[in-house]
Amino acid sequence: MADLKSVYMGIELKNPVIAGASELTSNMDAIKRIEDSGAGALVIKSLFEEQIQLERARFDEEQHKYDDIHAEMTSIYPNLEHSGPEQHLMWVRKTKETVSVPVFASLNAVNQETWVEWAKKLRDTGVDGLELNFFANPERHEESAELLEQEQLDTVRAVTKDLGIPVSVKLSVFYTAPLATAKRFGEAGAAGLVLFNKFFHPDIDPEAEKFALPLNLSTTTDSRLPLRYAGLLYGDTRASVCTSGGIMDGLDVAKMILAGADVVQVVSTLYRNKITQIGRILNDLSAWMDGKGYASLADFRGKLSRKNSTDPWAYKRAQYAKLLMKPDPLEIIR
Ligand SMILES: Cc1cc2nc3c(=O)[nH]c(=O)nc-3n(C[C@H](O)[C@H](O)[C@H](O)COP(=O)(O)O)c2cc1C
């Protein structure tokens, strides 16, 4: 059987398949099944700023309960009733104690102090690394790209300073210049780049004239974007590259490694095909490698990156123009 050993942010993994952050990694039964299925590592569901703020609000409320009762306080974050940050820390610690594969915590904060304070608290649980989940939709017109990116870079610098465990950044797909931004994150101290975060957007139910928030799982075509950027980043960053988004099966993982990824994260495929899909992914990746005569991932990592590809057009605009200038690109005109 092919050797699937991988290194992510300096940490040795038995294989490159990481279960990404989701509800599945906030459930002990699912976590055990993730480990039993052979995952190389897992990322625990993010701790969110809202959970932390709610706890603080409750604390204030306790202190001032006789002079001013904030009757609506808990209704602001209705789903977070039983998910305080202290419970989250206990949960992360318990997960780390229960499984033998590397465990990464994930944090999604807003304020600089919260990022730094809670990064340290999460580190103290004993996790192997920390993922910064930069999920923030621009809401204010006056927020420029420069300002938003500078804030994120400052956060990476502040969090990584003296933390003592490796930190990855889960990037948004919306940077104007993703390669330059990825590079700057690396220089600011990120040991890993997760390409990319998944953004959940509101939908509108036209009958009810109300907002809906559907949880759309990825499809396999979503993997093209991370594949492109893994291919472009290969050899140009010291940070580990972890692709995420639309990776469904063993061949999708093979493609990512060919492009240049170090490791991958999977979530949607575990919802669609059950957690045992991890085992199938590993078997299929292994079988593909055996068929190709590859003994280890290093034998083909980055073979189809921009740096190593023999096709000079693969990552260029010309490829796009070539496709769209075809008289019938989808071959539907008969
Ligand atoms: C139900 C669900 C919950 C998620 N929760 C988190 C989370 O807490 N933190 C995070 O960074 N990403 C979260 N994600 C995003 C995933 O980690 C992943 O980036 C995304 O789903 C893309 O990977 P996929 O195409 O394999 O699903 C969640 C995704 C789903 C479907």
Image (tube, rainbow, N blue to C red):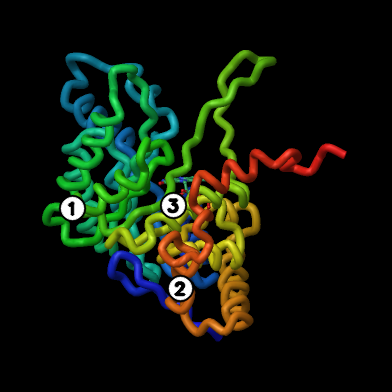
Question: Residue at position x 49%, y 58% from top?
Answer: 312
Q: Which amino acid lies under the numbered mark 2 shown in the image of this protein?
A: Asn
Q: Is residue 325 left or right of residue 328?
A: left
Q: Is residue 233 left or right of residue 66?
A: right
- The residue pinned by badge 1 equals 160
Mark 2: which secondary structure? loop
Corner quadrant of residue 286: bottom right
- The residue pinned by badge 3 equals 229
- Work out which residue is located at the far right of the displayed protein and give it: 334
Question: Residue at position x 19%, y 37% from top?
Answer: 112
Where does residue 32 sit, x and y in percent of width and height?
A: 48, 66
Q: Which amino acid lies under the numbered mark 3 shown in the image of this protein?
A: Tyr
User: Label 2 to label 3, Cα distance in Å?
Assistant: 21 Å
Q: Is residue 298 left or right of residue 201?
A: left
Viewer-side residue, 132 vs 318: 318
Q: Which amino acid lies under the numbered mark 1 shown in the image of this protein?
A: Thr
Q: Is mark 1 within 8 Å of ligand 1?
A: no
296 shown above or below 109 = below
Chain-order first, disc 2 or disc 3: 2
- The residue pinned by badge 2 equals 15
Chain-order first, disc 2 or disc 1: 2
Where does residue 195 sit, x and y in percent of width and height?
A: 42, 51
Viewer-side residue, 213 vs 95: 213
Mark 3: which secondary structure? helix
Marks 1, 3: nearer the viewer = 3
Where does residue 82 sit, x and y in percent of width and height?
A: 39, 39
255 shown above or below 297 = above
